[in-house]
Image (tube, coloured by chain):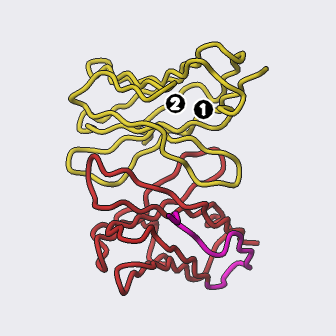
Chain colours: A red, B yellow
Amino acid sequence: GAGVSQTPSNKVTEKGKYVELRCDPISGHTALYWYRQSLGQGPEFLIYFQGTGAADDSGLPNDRFFAVRPEGSVSTLKIQRTERGDSAVYLCASSPLAGDGYTQYFGPGTRLTVL
Amino acid sequence: DQQVKQNSPSLSVQEGRISILNCDYTNSMFDYFLWYKKYPAEGPTFLISISSIKDKNEDGRFTVFLNKSAKHLSLHIVPSQPGDSAVYFCAASAVSGYALNFGKGTSLLVTP
């Protein structure tokens, strides 16, 4: 079946602009995760959804970052007043349920470049 | 504070030989460990995992070993193939957790 998809694959924006990044999880997966990978680093956790609610948003760096998952499937990561330091690959993952033993399957990522 | 560490940024191995990738962790609450493989411009692909109740898990050419007392795990690939050339990430999650903590990755190059 189809894997996790993310759009756009690349996004270039100017400092101060607003961006939205979309994630379509694997059908039937109730848990959805956002990670951010900066150059030379491993992915860093941002936020996790169980169904429609954000169960843990402790990884969001500041209040310019927000994510929603209104119908428990597609999720959108929103970044306001983008800064050059936000440039990174934003990865989305999904799993059937959350917790140990439930493998997280990753999408290809969205490469965000803030000029 | 990096809780999962992969101290070798790169590794080069000849085709047919064994590749050993190492990973250390500091958080004693971690109880589930995974290895992901990543090709350029693609997302990480799940490779193999191990629970803390085991010390070894094998899947084809891939074996993961866990030494809880040393807080160390390793991934063995035997025999190594050129298609194994990729960046390998070690990841861990805590008891009842869900957020994965990743290392910085090791770039493996398998030469013919």
Residue A88, given in percent of the width and then of the height, sits at 63, 61
The subunit carrying tag 1 is B
Tell me the magenta residue range. Answer: A1-18
Residue at position x 55%, y 49% from top?
Answer: B44
Return the mark for residue B6.
2
Q: Residue at x 23, y 38 (%)?
A: B29
Image side of residue B65 versus residue A41, left or right: left
Say which of B100 and A27 sits in front: A27
Around disc 1, counting alpha carbons within 10 Å, would you say few (fewer than 14), some (14 to 19), or many (20 or more)?
many
Question: Going from the N terminus, do you reach mark 1 or mark 2 first?
Answer: 2
Q: Quadrant of the C terminus of chain A?
A: bottom right
Disc on res. B40: none
Q: CA distance from mark 1 to mark 2?
A: 7 Å
**Residue B2 image point, x, y percent:** 44, 40
> Are the residues tagged 1 and 2 within 8 Å (C-beta)?
yes
Question: Which residue appears at 42% of the width and 41% of the height?
Answer: B91
Tag in front: 1 or 2: 1
Q: Chain of mark 2?
A: B
Front-most of residues A105 and B59: B59
Asked if residue A12 lies in the magenta stretch, the reply is yes
Q: Image quadrant of residue A67?
A: bottom left
Q: Amino acid at mark 1?
A: Thr
Give yes or no for residue A19 being in the magenta stretch.
no
Q: Amino acid at mark 2?
A: Gln
Q: Is residue B6 above or below residue A73?
A: above
Check disc 2 and report its element: helix, strand or loop.
Answer: loop
Q: Which residue is mark 1?
A: B106
Residue B37, by quadrant, is: top right
Q: Position of residue B70 (x, y in %)?
A: 32, 18
